[in-house]
Image (cartoon, grey):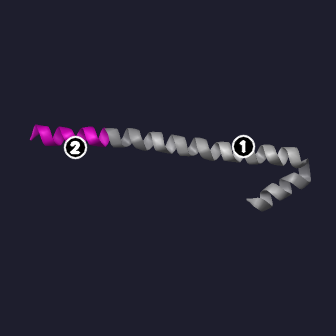
Amino acid sequence: MSSAYDGFGRVVGGGAALAFAAALLASGLSSSGVGTYSGQVVMDGFNVYLLWQVFSG
């Protein structure tokens, strides 16, 4: 990643390289949030299925 940042900085300038780093950080944070939320939804459905199996027989 540091080589991409350095190369980007040389080609378009330091401000654009900083914007690239901020965008990369934001995309990582949003990806983590989506993964956590989708895992929560899946586990909620899984838990409902388990409870249904316990109470139905």
Q: Residue furthest bottom?
A: 3
Q: Residue furthest left?
A: 57
Amino acid on which the number 1 mark rests in the picture = Ala
Report the residue marked by disc 1. Answer: 23
Tell me which corner region of the image, top left, top right, bottom left or bottom right, holds residue 47.
top left
- Look at the magenta stretch and give its main secondary structure: helix
Q: Specify the quadrant that holds the C terminus.
A: top left
Tell me which corner region of the image, top left, top right, bottom left or bottom right, holds residue 7.
bottom right
Label 2 neighbour load within 10 Å: few <14, some 14-19, many 20+: few
Q: Whole-percent x and y of residue 27?
A: 64, 43
Q: CA distance from mark 1 to mark 2?
A: 40 Å
The relative height of residue 32 versus residue 3 in the rendered view (above or below) is above
**Residue 43 in magenta stretch:** no
Part of the protein shown in magenta: 45-57
**Residue 55 in magenta stretch:** yes
Q: Whole-percent x and y of residue 5?
A: 80, 55
Q: Whole-percent x and y of residue 31?
A: 57, 44
Q: Specify the quadrant that holds the N terminus.
A: bottom right
Q: Is residue 7 left or right of residue 54?
A: right
**Labelled pair 1, 2 in contact (Cβ < 8 Å):** no
Label 1 neighbour load within 10 Å: few <14, some 14-19, many 20+: few
Report the residue marked by disc 2. Answer: 50
